[in-house]
Image: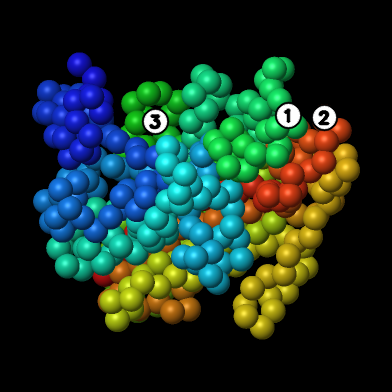
């Protein structure tokens, strides 16, 4: 029989059920979602009984919760400006309040980037990392629809909808703060259930905010500079390094002290917007303090980094009066090779790639223009859709 919250509200009991299924030859994995409104419970330092996480708990959770949902209809769970004040793109599709209680969710323990840092902290104390998960996106519309673009939001398809009321509502889950939903990208060896499950289990996945770019991410110590200029670079990357979702162990460095080389490649959604930039996000511990840094790795046009190392804005072609945009800026494809300038061989770290598209009209703008109504002021008129890869986990 299926296991549900009627059987138990504690995830540990679900994990035991999954372990029992595995013993019978029925494999499974679990994918937690909506961490942003978990009130800090999703990636807490404690278990369901409020006791500190143990090594056994950490190993069990890591073996079952192989993935986590970073974005969906009820907002994005990557990070927030409160957690990442130096990340200019941290304010993306945020939901503040809990689902059933009119108060803000506790931000600590509710976002992916902090969870990766907490996992490193727990591993340092227990010897195991409970938060070593890959990333996907999904819809969670509760409609049975798989559509997830700004043009396809269910709000645009409901003929009986009170559009004016919806566009003025920034407080409920039927209001303007909700997102259109995300998508899961999976690099599988073939289009079969078995191959897709295997890819999900090994975390070779990426998430998007609803559009369909394709993203690859690799890391290794034995790449030569310029490998991505070779026609068979993907084959060489699989042969000589690890893909997204995998461990990169110091032992594979063969005595090298230099940073591993990271390879990242993105191709635009064929029916969507051009690409703005590729970034690599690094999370690590330093003197027991959680640290993060966002690096621009590859970007469109002839922009130059400024004094703080950041790339200027790509600009915008969005016309809010007509709810349209053009692909006159941005790139069809971006590719980058990068080495961490702060790499320390003895220091564990988590690295993932984030790909940003150029600005496009948000669904609320499309809906307002279609119905000749004012644009809502509680959400931005344009959105920079994006993708996130599963991390590479550097293990010293």
- Rounded to the nearest angstrom, the CA distance separating label 1 from label 3 is 39 Å
Q: Nearer the viewer, residue 296 or 175?
A: 175
Disc assigned to residue 163: 1
Q: Position of residue 224 (x, y in %)?
A: 48, 67
Q: Nearer the viewer, mark 1 or mark 3?
A: 1
What's the image's color scheme?
rainbow
**Residue drawn 60% across the image and 60% down it:** 89
Image marks 2 and 1: residues in contact by CB distance under 8 Å: yes
- In the rendered structure, which disc, 1 or 3, sits on the residue that comes first in sequence? 1
- In the rendered structure, which disc, 2 or 1, sits on the residue that comes first in sequence? 1
Question: What residue is shown with label 3?
Answer: 196
* Quadrant in which the N terminus appears: top left
Q: Nearer the viewer, residue 362 or 260?
A: 362
Q: Position of residue 261 (x, y in %)?
A: 46, 67
Question: What residue is shown with label 2?
Answer: 371
**Is 237 left, or right, of 20 in this rendering?**
right
Q: Secondary structure at mark 3?
A: helix
Residue 97 vertical position relative to residue 299 in the rendered view, above or below: above
Residue 112 vertical position relative to residue 347 in the rendered view, above or below: above
**Label 2, residues with CA under 10 Å away: few <14, some 14-19, many ≥20:** few
Q: Nearer the viewer, residue 371 or 70?
A: 371
């Amino acid at each position: 029989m299926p296991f549900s919250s009627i059987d138990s509200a504690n995830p540990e009991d679900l994990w035991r059920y999954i372990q029992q299924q595995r013993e019978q030859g029925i494999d499974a994995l679990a994918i937690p979602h909506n961490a942003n409104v978990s009130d800090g419970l999703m990636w807490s330092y404690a278990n369901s009984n409020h006791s500190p996480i143990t090594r056994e708990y950490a190993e069990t959770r890591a073996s079952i919760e192989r993935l986590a949902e970073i974005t969906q209809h009820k907002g994005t769970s990557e990070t927030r400006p409160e957690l990442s004040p130096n990340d200019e793109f941290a304010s993306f599709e945020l939901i503040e309040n809990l689902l059933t209680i009119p108060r803000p969710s506790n931000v600590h323990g509710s976002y992916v980037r902090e969870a990766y840092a907490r996992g490193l902290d727990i591993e340092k104390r227990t010897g195991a990392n409970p938060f070593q998960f890959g990333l996907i996106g999904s819809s969670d519309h509760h409609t049975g629809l798989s559509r997830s673009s700004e043009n396809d939001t269910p709000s645009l398809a409901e003929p009986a909808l009170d559009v004016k009321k919806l566009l003025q509502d920034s407080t409920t889950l039927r209001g303007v703060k909700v997102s259109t939903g995300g998508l899961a990208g999976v690099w599988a060896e073939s289009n079969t259930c078995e191959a897709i499950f295997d890819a999900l289990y090994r975390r070779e996945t990426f998430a998007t905010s609803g559009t369909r770019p394709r993203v690859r991410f690799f890391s290794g110590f034995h790449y030569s500079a310029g490998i991505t200029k070779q026609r068979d670079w993907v084959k060489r990357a699989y042969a000589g390094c690890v893909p997204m979702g995998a461990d990169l162990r110091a032992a594979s460095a063969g005595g090298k002290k230099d940073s591993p080389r990271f390879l990242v490649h993105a191709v635009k959604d064929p029916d969507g917007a051009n690409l703005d930039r590729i970034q690599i996000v690094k999370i690590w511990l330093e003197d027991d303090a959680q640290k993060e840094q966002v690096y621009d790795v590859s970007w469109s046009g002839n922009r130059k980094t400024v004094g703080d190392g950041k790339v200027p804005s790509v600009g915008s072609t969005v016309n809010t009066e007509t709810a349209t945009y053009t692909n006159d800026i941005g790139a069809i494809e971006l590719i980058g090779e990068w080495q961490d300038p702060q790499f320390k061989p003895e220091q564990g770290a988590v690295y993932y790639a984030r790909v940003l598209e150029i600005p496009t009209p948000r669904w609320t703008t499309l809906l307002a223009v279609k119905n000749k109504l004012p644009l809502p002021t509680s959400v931005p008129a344009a959105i920079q859709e994006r993708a996130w890869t599963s991390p590479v986990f550097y293990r010293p």
